Image (tube, helix red, strand yellow):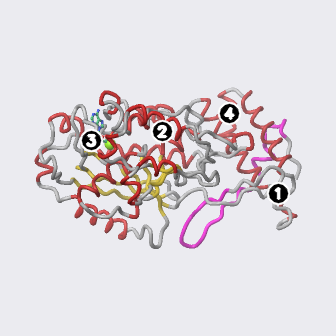
Amino acid sequence: MHLCVNCCFSCLANAPVVLSSTAEDWEIEVRISTKGETDGDKNPQKSPLSGDAVYKELSKINGNINQMSKAAVISKLRELKLNTEGSTEILRKRLKNHYRKQKLTNANLLTVSKLFPYYVIVDFEATCEEVNAPNYPHEIIEFPAVLVDTEKQKVLDHFQAYCRPVLNPTLSDFCVELTGITQDQVESASLFPEVLANFEAWLAKHKLGTKHKYAVVTDGPWDMGRFLYGQCKISEISYPQFGKKWVNIRKVFSNFYRCKRLAPTWDHFHTIVPVEQTNITSQGQQFCLKLMLEHIEMIFEGRPHCGLDDARNIARILLHMVKDGASIQYNERIHLTSRDAKNIQNAANRICHNCDSPERTVMPILSSDQNRTAAQVRREVRKWESRRVKLSDEDTDEENRQVLDT
Ligand code: AMP
Ligand code: MG
């Protein structure tokens, strides 16, 4: 098939998109071969164009789309029965992605897992002070989760439980005001280990991790790297399986929509730098959530810092990205060895060096880390942030193959 790029792409619009699926799981598979490689040996009849030719065509199509007015892009999207909401930038991205999928599929360049069939969005709320001391032992006080079905493109269920803190059983006025969680709610709640068991029973009820594949999603690295890890230490229980790898939606979002890194991350996350810089502020997650929502022309629904509402809004962002054709895969995981607990610097040296790995490793944050100086932390942050890794959540056009995992 010859693909013309100067028509309004109707030749492409009619090309089939092949999605692979299994009986139990629904997954879109995407693999981008290396430049020039076409899998021609395996399926010669399915590779009408070489990798080079396909990427050249795609580049021309992208150029044409960049010249189209917003109205023209909307009209094309409507014709293709695609979502017509969003800024010009988002609409163009959607149209480009549509043709990209079709061309790469047609050239047999698309083949590997792109979406999980289910996502579980988690957003912990924790005890806090207005200014958190560097070694403040945050305890989880709200454990919310939202289950998203990718195929049906909707929220299926949610889990919510409050937890009773033990180290700081009385919530600060600031914490009550920030999260909306009352002293009565936490006093009548179960301790964290019981809530965790209930959450795991909820996962099991939905056959998540058994019959169905799923991935946990958070906004930022600290729900797992800080709150869950710290809470397990406090409760003296082992770190749960579900929190070992997760999707940091913020990274997927900024890569997919090509917007700058969305919010303070490491400085926001680390408690080691001077207190005034380490305080988890509303400039953190809420700022980022708000920015992501604004970028896709949505507004926050519910109460900010209510864990369940935060998770629901993250679910809305995720669903929007699914509709826009984003690839949403694990991109962070935690290191869990006793050495990590003793020596964070050693652990930092073991951070994913393998460029084939799509994940960034998040170092658990321990109160013992306070011995490090602010300058040491900044050096580590710079080192980590300057590493090049190949992202799994990248919308991997040839020209965008290498992206800084900032
Ligand atoms: P979030 O998911 O943004 O609601 O934040 C999770 C947790 O981080 C909260 O439950 C607090 O423990 C802490 N946190 C968030 N924002 C602040 C803030 N402005 N000051 C102190 N702690 C905060
Ligand atoms: Mg929250």
Q: Which disc is residue 135 wearing? A: 3
Type of amino acid under label 4: Val
Q: Which disc is residue 380 wearing? A: 2
The residue drawn where x is 34% and y is 33% is: 278
Q: Residues within 10 Å of mark 1 (few under 14, many from 20)?
A: many
4 and 2 marks in contact (CB < 8 Å)? no
In primary-sequence order, the first of circles 2 and 1 is 1
Q: CA distance from mark 4 to mark 2?
A: 44 Å
Q: Nearer the viewer, residue 338 or 292?
A: 338
* Element at label 4: helix
Q: Is residue 113 left or right of residue 309?
A: right
Q: Report whether the residue tagged 4 is closer than 8 Å to ligand 1.
A: no
Report which residue position mark 1 lands on: 38
Q: Position of residue 312 (x, y in %)?
A: 37, 47
Question: Where are the magenta residues, as a range?
Answer: 5-30
The residue drawn where x is 32% and y is 32% is: 281
The residue drawn where x is 78% and y is 47% is: 12
Type of amino acid under label 2: Glu
